[in-house]
Image (tube, rainbow, N blue to C red):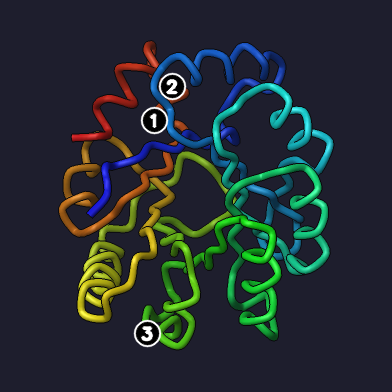
Amino acid sequence: MYKAQIAPSLLSSDFSRLAAEISTLDSSGADILHLDVMDGHYVPNLSFGFPIIKAVRNLTQLPLDVHLMVTNPDFHVPRLIEIGVQWISFHQETVHHSHRLISQIKEHGIKAGVALNPATPINTLDSILPLLDYVLVMSVNPGYSAQAFIPEVLDKIQYLSDYRKAHALSFYIEVDGGVSAANSTALLNAGADILVSASYIFNSPSYSTAIQALRH
């Protein structure tokens, strides 16, 4: 449906040389930069907040994709709009009125997505899929980088791909967690459009080679 896009996740980057890391990703063929915002409550980890996201925004022209792993995404969205990110996703378990938050995000020309944990049934999204610009399918339990890929999520990706086609929808399918060249072909064949990769890219001697390997 779409040309496969690769979104390196900055969670695995070397924060002590963040500008250099982003510059290398820029020149290595990255399509999007993925930023995981964690609060230590919804997930058992902390990552980075608004100052870092703002700094990243000033370092690149690449679209910024912010994944809110927080209990209060309503609080974060207005600040992210001010910073100028292009994609925002939140976990449906953290929001009482998903329609309202999706509308708020989209009103500002930002792509709105919902993230789905591995244990969350896929059909819980059916009622809001027509509103979404993308679905972020988690292929690990959120909170930490370098976890093992959960292969059962391939069925969820296929479900979303089939649903999209059957209902003439155009949302993207994004996958995050344990993504590498070993499983990228299966993910793309199932219907994924965007692959988020963290440790696979940042542990590779060549970011460019790793990114190209993920496209196939």
Q: Is residue 167 above or below residue 48?
A: below
- How far separated are the C-alphas under marks 1 and 3? 30 Å
Residue tagged 1: 200
The Cα–Cα distance between marks 1 and 2, rounded to whole angstroms, is: 6 Å
Q: Position of residue 133 (x, y in %)?
A: 47, 63
Q: Which residue is mark 2?
A: 203
Q: Regarding mark 3 in the picture, which secondary structure is present there? A: helix
Count residues near mark 2 (Cα–Cα under 10 Å), then give few for <14, some for 14-19, many for 20+: few
Residue depth check, mark 3 versus mark 2: number of the one nearer the observer: 3
Which structural element holds mark 1?
helix
Q: Amino acid at mark 3?
A: Asn
Q: Which residue is mark 3?
A: 123
Tell me which corner region of the image, top left, top right, bottom left or bottom right, holds residue 104.
Answer: bottom right
Return the disc, 3 or 2, that comes first in the chain's sequence. Answer: 3
The residue that appears at 59% across and 69% down in the rendered structure is 91
x, y (%) of residue 7?
Answer: 45, 38
At label 1, counting other C-alpha atoms closer than 10 Å, the crowd grade (few under 14, some 14-19, many 20 or more) is: many
Quadrant housing residue 129 = bottom left
Q: Residue at x 51, y 13 (%)?
A: 24
